[in-house]
Amino acid sequence: MKNIRSISIVLLLLICMVPVFGQFQEIMIEALPDMVGARVRVSTESDATFQGTLYSVTDEFILIQDRDGQILTIVKAVIIEVLLIDAGLDEKAYYQDSASNRLLVMPTGFPMEPGEFHIADQEIAAVTMSYGVNRNFSLWGGISLPGALVSARYIWSLGDRAALSVGSFAGISWMEFLGIIIPYTIFSVGEPEDNFTLGAGTAFTFDSDDFSLDAAILVLGRKWVLSDTTAIVTENWIIWGQITDYGVDYETSSRAWDFVPWMIVPGVAFRIAGEKFSWDIGVVLPTWVERSSGEYYLEGLGGRGTFVPVPLISLTYRID
């Protein structure tokens, strides 16, 4: 029990760093001539976003110098928003993440842009796609060797710095007729690129003979921007289910729900991010709980008390 409490405390300390607020301040287009030399983020009618140093302002155009020294010309008539970037944030303010719609696996609570489309490859064996239908609805699908999953979610924006999503995963296994349904709720506070996310759901499985509730799930996640191209992303799953109690020996074993989590899966990755490509390089640590004659034990992939991390590698490409 002490080990379980220790892991829970470490997870909370890891993910509960407060997201950065007050990074941006909206300014009027008429005030742009006085902002030459400042760093800005410009959004246009086509949902494109441009960042850089305001280089020049004319009656019809604004010119922005990006971090590579290129000059971008934007027509004033198509601009819908200009944000002044806090000068104290240095290079972090230029961070743009093509995988900003998700943590390691699960989505954040924030909406995708209308028409935004991502393809991601996880661990080589799994390919996923996500699409923003509009500001309130997005779709996700994935396929791998064991089976396939799809998800749909509805999103509410809660002011400028928070969002709530409600949706469900549904999947099926290729190897045998076994399906899973995971209704979920996800809450995020901060920004799509830098946030704290809390998710909760339940897992139902079904086959030709049975439909049952098998797990309750809590996920704690965090994105933390380090520089203009790098971030730390953590996603930590805590799953309650039926724990096996082996009693005196294996012959007297039984399974029952318990207040202790059945499984804990912390994960962390270093993300190399860009507007079109993002890479994740990290690890996850599958850990589950066993019980014998009322005593709890932690077990990893290497057996009781032996915790073997699993490498995590993924690539995300934003098509639009």
Image: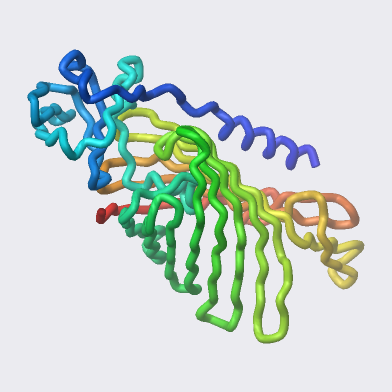
Residue 141 versus residue 33 in the image, above or below: below
Number of marks: 0
Q: Residue at x 37, y 62 (%)?
A: 129
Q: Is residue 128 left or right of residue 164?
A: left
Residue 310 in view in this figure:
yes
Residue 57 image offset from top left, x and y in percent: 11, 23
Q: Which quadrant of the structure image shows residue 160?
A: top left
Which residue is located at x 14 percent, y 28 percent? Answer: 64
Q: Is residue 66 above or below residue 274?
A: above
Q: Quadrant of residue 141?
A: bottom left
The image position of residue 148, as x and y in percent, is 47, 72
Residue 229, image quadrant: top left
What colouring does the structure picture have?
rainbow
Residue 306 visible in the snapshot: no
The structure residue drawn at horizontal position 33% and vertical position 25%, both measured from the top left corner, is 26
Give percent across and percent down for residue 72. Answer: 11, 33
Residue 233 higher or lower than 259, as above or below: above
Pick the quarter of the image with the N terminus: top right
Q: Nearer the viewer, residue 233 or 123?
A: 233
277 left or right of 56 in image: right
Q: Quadrant of the C terminus?
A: bottom left
What x and y, as percent, mark residue 290? 77, 56
Please name the residue shown 52% across and 35% down the image: 189
Q: Is residue 86 left or right of residue 74?
A: right
102 left or right of 50 in image: right
Q: Residue furthest bottom?
A: 208
